[in-house]
Amino acid sequence: MSDVYTLYGWHLSYFTGKALCYLRYKQVPHQHKAVDMVTLGWRIQRKTGTAVMPVLVTPEGAWINDSSLIIDHVEALVPGPSIHPATPVQRFASYLMEAWGDEWWVPMAMHTRWTYPENYALFEREAGRALLPGLPGFVQRRAVRSVAGKLRDMLPAVGVRPGQFALMDAWMADMLDQLDAHFGQHRFLFGDRPTLGDFGLVGTFYGHLGRDPWPARELIAPRPQLRAWIDRMAEPAPAAAAADAVRPPALLDHDRIPPTLLPVFQAIAREFLPLLEGINRQVRARLADWPAGKSLPRRLADVEVPMGAGRFRRAAIPYTLWMAQRTLDVYRGLQPPEKAQVRAWLVAIGGERLLDLDIPRLRLHGVRVAAGGDGPA
Ligand SMILES: N[C@@H](CCC(=O)N[C@@H](CS)C(=O)NCC(=O)O)C(=O)O
């Protein structure tokens, strides 16, 4: 047993980036280990039921998978500025942003990584060294080919289909401009310190858009304010972090959401909400004759939703609803006047239907979900 946390994962991994930025910001003593083949395929599989990263091993020896549960666990124990705003609208918006960052952006990150062959050299080098440290390069390269093959096989399901590239590219160009404009005005999403929403959003940018050579050069470098936010999230300055712990920098006063995020939240209401509704319809239909407690399939049939000026298709992933449930639980925990404030804000962004999303109670099993229960399995 160690007296510090261990985070298993790769810099290349979306959700490892999210957890890593969080642990650094909270100044949690931790070691980061680039997970090898045996740890991923055997130890993590045995401890969590699935071969996934990131996984956090606590000083007590618990193995926690899922970046959201990792953050919840540490946040409950470690002092320092909370990543949860104290006021209702910002708090709710921060969870919604986490869900959107985690789930909506996956196709964008996978598209910008796997569509442009120049990114492969970095993936091959880092994944090879991590998977089989010390073995000859040709053995490492063969192992990476097999992992890369599995990831490429997932592309069509998450919506990375050549017929949709132009739509995704146009959507990204617009959204990255919005984010660049926002970070020109604010250091983080809701003010001068990061919240859960920042950590959800940075997943896409840490390992993929901000680090893979093609998107880093073509999409992020031309947007310097966005670049600066990614760098602030990835490497919180120790001196600043220490000062923050003593006197946390402020979020916007009066529970305001920065106007620069209005187009972003409007897009979430217009696009992500129909995705949640479409997944929920399929999950409800599937649960009608599904054995109690059994995990749902990882993916169901396609859902078609608006994206920018077009329509986008991807497979319904029941797990995405677990992230929405997490957001809606924040609403359920509020007092009536606070609920009214959140509802009014949702009306203002065109997303009031989010509160009508009647999700069957879901529990997490590895990377899948099952109906029933209150918390994670
Ligand atoms: N919701 C999970 C997602 C974890 C996840 O999808 N991790 C990827 C790497 S970034 C992975 O290990 N994928 C393997 C798989 O999907 O089977 C989290 O937040 O940690």
Image (cartoon, rainbow, N blue to C red):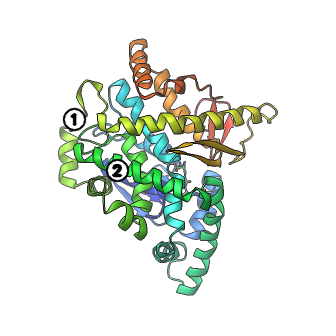
Work out whether 340 lies above or below 217.
above
56 or 222, nearer to the observer: 222
Expressed as whole percent of the image width and height from the top left, the position of residue 74 reads 41, 43
Q: Mark 2 and mark 1: span between their CA atoms?
A: 25 Å
Secondary structure found at label 2: helix
On residue 250, which mark appears?
Answer: 1
Left or right: 284 as drawn, with respect to 222? right
Q: Residue 177 at x, y = what percent? A: 34, 50
Residue beneath disc 2:
177
Please determine whether, in this image, residue 64 is positioned above or below residue 349.
below
Q: Which of 201 and 54 is in front in this view?
A: 201
Q: Is 82 situated above or below 45? A: above
Q: What residue type is labelled 1?
A: Ala
Query: Residue placed farthest to the right in the image?
Result: 289
**Upstream in the sequence, badge 2 or badge 1?**
2
Quadrant of res 249:
top left
